[in-house]
Amino acid sequence: MKLSVLKLYSLAAVALFVLVFSACRTEPAAKPRLIAVSYIGGDTAGNNYLNWLRRADPQVRYVVMNLYPWDSVGIIFDDCTGLLLTGGEDIYPGYYNQTEDTARCGGFNHYRDSLEFLLIEQALQRKLPIMGVCRGQQILNVAMGGTLVVDIPTEIQTAVYHRCIDWQNCYHRVMILSDNLLTAVGAQSGDSVTSNHHQAVKRTADDLKVLAVANDGVVEAVGWKEPAGKPFLLGVQWHPERMDTISRLSMPLARRFLEEAE
């Protein structure tokens, strides 16, 4: 009888311990949304890319990666939940074995190339959402093994103006190829976009596919070839951050990217 009572006391003690322990346990807090913006030259105040993110979500947090010392990049990036690759200078063609075409390029920023290659590698390893704009699409493609058209005017006979002196009035249409990520965010057959570039994706990386093209065949958007089970990834050649918020190829892209980085 005494043994049975002791046994009951023991079972009750174990049950109480489990109950208290369970009550004390808390689920780990979700990481707050923090977007790594790869590179912004000059003052960040009024920057188009940052304003674009803020219009999509006034509460968005971001960190501009080139403003920090190289040895701090990895530590800072550990807290980020998404990567935005911005537009800018040409990518050094030696990265895709076309060093002989250097003369047909503009200026280079080798530090930026190295920084963004590192960020892309780390983002892919961490399975973070990635959004690339203009140069951002190009370096994403190069980082994953693709190549570029070094200079559209000398390589492609086209009546489409991909770069103008007045970029605010440099619009052309893009055509979306079948159902893909772009149609999923609200764009249908295509729309007009503003662009400012003389380079473009030539051979897409093996893991990527073309999502949209201009009327002359220039690649305008890329995404995963096999998206199942992979994080959000989208590169666009146009500049959604410079476009009207009502455009189906501007604000919906920012909102979807930020949702994926939640």
Image (spheres, grey):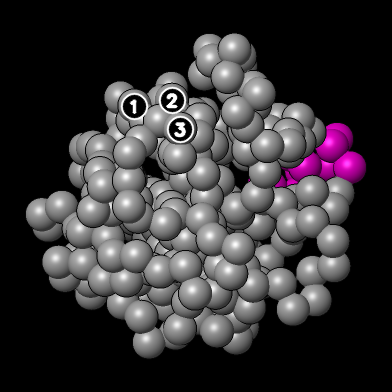
Q: Position of residue 237 (x, y in %)?
A: 43, 52
Q: Main secondary structure of the magenta part?
A: helix
Q: Amino acid at mark 3?
A: Thr
Question: Callout 2: helix, strand or loop?
Answer: loop
Q: Amino acid at mark 1?
A: Arg
First along the sequence among labels 1 and 3? 3
Question: Callout 1: helix, strand or loop?
Answer: loop
**Residue that badge 3 annotates:** 154
Q: Residue at x 84, y 37 (%)?
A: 70
Q: Position of residue 173 (x, y in %)?
A: 28, 65
Q: Residues within 10 Å of mark 1 (few under 14, many from 20)?
A: some
Q: Of all residues shown, which one is farthest toward the right?
A: 69
Q: Quadrant of residue 152?
A: top left
CB atoms at circles 2 and 1 under 8 Å apart? yes
Q: Quadrant of residue 11?
A: bottom left
**Residue that badge 1 annotates:** 203
Q: Is residue 14 visible?
A: no
Front one among 143 and 241? 241
First along the sequence among labels 2 and 1? 2
Q: Residues within 10 Å of mark 2 (few under 14, many from 20)?
A: many
Q: Position of residue 48 (x, y in %)?
A: 64, 72
Magenta segment boundaries in residue numbering: 69-78
The nearer-to-camera label among 1 and 3 is 3
Q: Residue at x 36, y 75 (%)?
A: 252
